[in-house]
Image (cartoon, rainbow, N blue to C red):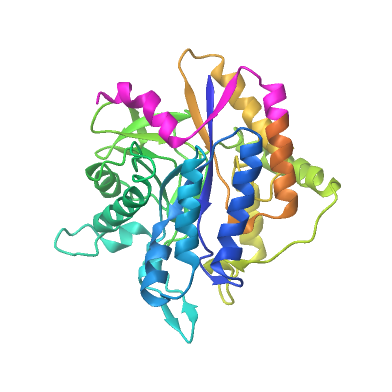
């Protein structure tokens, strides 16, 4: 059976946040959780813990961290899941006159190094994040464990040391890779073009993410973000989906903020944007959602799943900070139609559910 994990990167913008943290992240996430609860679908929040810690340090009177914590507790109480998302640039960012000065020089977790003598190395950041989530959620749900991870900005590479650090902290499920994904930026890039044609697979820190191995106790389970299967037809598919979305009555768009690569002086050229639009796979995402695109992707995975005997897993990704009225409507349309069209062929799960199904395979 195909198991779909609906995930949300629970975070602020990495450039400018034009509204309060409550209005950028908490309120849109609350609506997302309510919509999916109505459909009987659980969500896994990948919460960026670094921003919460930094807000407490530099803006101790801002209610944002407390509101996020309250949302995490409520989400778990309602049967959802919370796992670890890390944007470490927050630790270098500062506040002046109440305004954030975002510093992205150490954007990737790997940029913090793995020197055990450095108290601010990458593994210590992972450990702090895991401990924070468990201390926050275990009193409410004693069985809660932080065992899942998604890298900020998809920047999981170079991965060998990072995978080892995750395993050292008891984190053994990653859902960062989406097949065919590629960003050539030297500072925040990733390259998933050589990812195996699998929905999920086991990897070792020694051989890296792109080499599938047998399950084992010293391995990480990679659950891919779903994507379109054929890059050659991306431009056709994207045009169809864009038209399908355009034919729906558009609601007013609310601008809550922007990422660091949308700031003045960091704009990509038209040629770069066109290349990215054509070459990137259609991702299983509800950002700028198109129900038709999501259903086509799921249909591809369901057909493939019928040719295998064991459970398969993929995740869908979204960012509440960007969601607009049309996105919620399209996501609701997808949920209703997916249940109708693929009844009995799929189920919606959390990262915790996947862990419970795969613990025996892992040999622990």
Indicate whether 51 appears above or below 139. below
Q: Residue, x 33% and y 39% (percent of image)?
A: 142
Q: Residue, x 57% and y 76% (percent of image)?
A: 265
- Residue farthest to the left? 117
Q: Nearer the viewer, residue 311 or 39?
A: 39
User: Residue 323 appears at what percent x and percent y?
Assistant: 66, 54
- Residue farthest to the front? 140
User: Residue 312 appears at what percent x and percent y?
Assistant: 48, 24
Q: Nearer the viewer, residue 76 or 330?
A: 76
197 on left or right of 166: right
Indicate whether 102 appears above or below 289. below
Does residue 339 belong to the magenta stretch? Answer: yes
Tell me if residue 183 can be seen: no
Tell me if residue 4 can be seen: yes
Q: Which residues are magenta?
A: 337-364
Q: Residue, x 73% and y 43% (percent of image)?
A: 330
Indicate whether 214 appears above or below 131. above
User: Residue 285 appears at what percent x and percent y?
Assistant: 61, 43
Indicate whether 10 appears above or below 361. below
User: Residue 343 appears at what percent x and percent y?
Assistant: 66, 19
């Amino acid at each position: 059976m195909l198991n779909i994990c609906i995930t949300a990167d629970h975070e602020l913008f990495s450039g400018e946040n034009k509204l309060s943290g409550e209005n950028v992240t908490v309120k849109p996430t609350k609506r997302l959780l309510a919509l999916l609860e109505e459909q009987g679908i659980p969500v896994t929040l990948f919460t960026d813990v670094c921003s919460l810690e930094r807000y407490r340090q530099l803006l101790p009177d801002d209610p944002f961290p407390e509101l996020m914590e309250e949302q995490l507790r409520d989400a778990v109480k309602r049967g959802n899941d919370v796992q670890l998302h890390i944007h470490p640039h927050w630790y270098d960012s500062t506040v002046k006159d109440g305004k954030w000065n975002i510093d992205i020089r150490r954007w990737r977790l790997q940029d913090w190094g793995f020197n055990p003598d450095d108290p601010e190395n990458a593994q210590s950041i992972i450990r702090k994040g895991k401990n924070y989530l468990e201390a926050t959620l275990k009193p409410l749900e004693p069985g809660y464990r932080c065992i899942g991870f998604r890298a900020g900005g998809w920047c999981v590479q170079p991965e060998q040391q990072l995978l080892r650090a995750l395993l050292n902290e008891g984190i053994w499920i990653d859902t960062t890779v989406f097949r065919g994904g590629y960003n050539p930026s030297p500072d925040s890039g990733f390259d998933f073009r050589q990812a195996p044609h699998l929905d999920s697979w086991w990897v070792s820190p020694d051989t890296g993410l792109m080499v599938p191995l047998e399950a084992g106790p010293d391995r990480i389970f990679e659950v891919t973000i779903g994507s379109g299967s054929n890059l050659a037809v991306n431009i056709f598919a994207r045009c169809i989906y864009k038209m399908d979305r355009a034919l729906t009555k558009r609601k007013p768009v609310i601008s809550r903020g922007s990422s660091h690569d949308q700031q003045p002086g960091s704009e990509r050229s038209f040629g770069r944007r066109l290349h990215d639009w054509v070459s990137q796979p259609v991702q299983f995402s509800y950002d700028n959602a198109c129900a038709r695109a999501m259903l086509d992707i799921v249909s591809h995975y369901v057909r493939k799943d019928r040719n295998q005997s064991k459970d398969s897993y993929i995740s869908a990704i979204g960012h509440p900070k960007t969601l607009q009225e049309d996105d919620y409507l399209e996501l609701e349309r997808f949920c209703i139609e997916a249940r109708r069209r693929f009844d009995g062929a799929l189920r919606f799960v959390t990262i915790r559910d996947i862990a419970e199904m795969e613990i025996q395979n892992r040999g622990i």
